[in-house]
Amino acid sequence: MALTFNRRNDRERETSEFEEKMLFVNRTSKTYQGGRRFRFAALVILGDRNGRVGMGIGKAKEVPVAIEKAKAIARKNMITVPVENGTIPHDIVGENSTSRVLLKPAGPGTGVIAGTVPRSIAELAGITNMLSKELGSRNKVNVAYAVFDGLKNLRTAKQVRSARGLGEQPRVAGAAAVSATTEAGAAQAGGAL
């Protein structure tokens, strides 16, 4: 039995691990002598809800083709987001053009309190608790790029320690160990008197 190569089936299998969300479709038109010609741009987010997320913008003369292009671009531009206990490790401000987005960690049960674009990206990245505020321009494309800029620059405490060359942080003695040493010290001091 000969094995056949089917690129479409391989592509479908590849994307099945990712969930997709189309944020918006933009229509542009140009006037020619014979009339107007329309083109479409689609913004698509792909994510596995486990720390991996990607974004793509596809442009074409038809909407389905633009969406497929956007998905392909999103697959190529995947980033890994450090998610700790369902939230991000620290505050960060992502910037792109005139858009800035503040991303803040939140406690369990808070949920994702954010605008449409940051919420979609956070949910597909697997973030369940986060606060955000869009600052500056609210253009969806710029906001999406700003959120990705912020998520790309997130670092865990372990990554920061290794970057500074500190290695593993020494463990702090527990309360029981501290009280035992103070009792021993007090006994010695009492015996010396």
Image: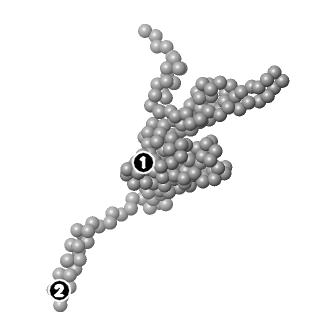
Which residue is outermost to the right? 33
Residue 174 rendering spot, x and y as whole percentages: 27, 66
Name the amino acid, label 1. Answer: Gly
State the image coordinates of residue 192 (x, y, percent, origin top left). 18, 88
- Tell me residue 151's x, y (percent): 52, 48
Name the one closer to the observer, 20 or 112. 112
The residue lying at 81 percent from left, 21 percent from top is 34
Neighbour tally class for label 2: few under 14, some 14-19, many 20 plus, Cα within 10 Å: few
Element under label 1?
loop
Q: Name the residue that disc number 1 marks.
A: 111
Q: Which mark is residue 135?
A: none
Chain-order first, disc 2 or disc 1: 1
Type of the residue with mark 2: Gly
Q: Residue at x 47, y 56 (%)?
A: 90
Q: Is residue 155 visible in this depiction of the protein?
A: no
Going by the picture, which residue comes out furthest to the left? Answer: 191
Quadrant of the image for the N terminus?
A: top left
The residue that disc 2 covers is 190
Residue shown at 60% from the left, 25% from the top: 64
Using the image, determine if residue 35 lies above or below residue 117: above
Q: Considering only vertical position in the picture, is 162 above or below 12?
A: below
Left or right: residue 187 versus residue 18 is: left
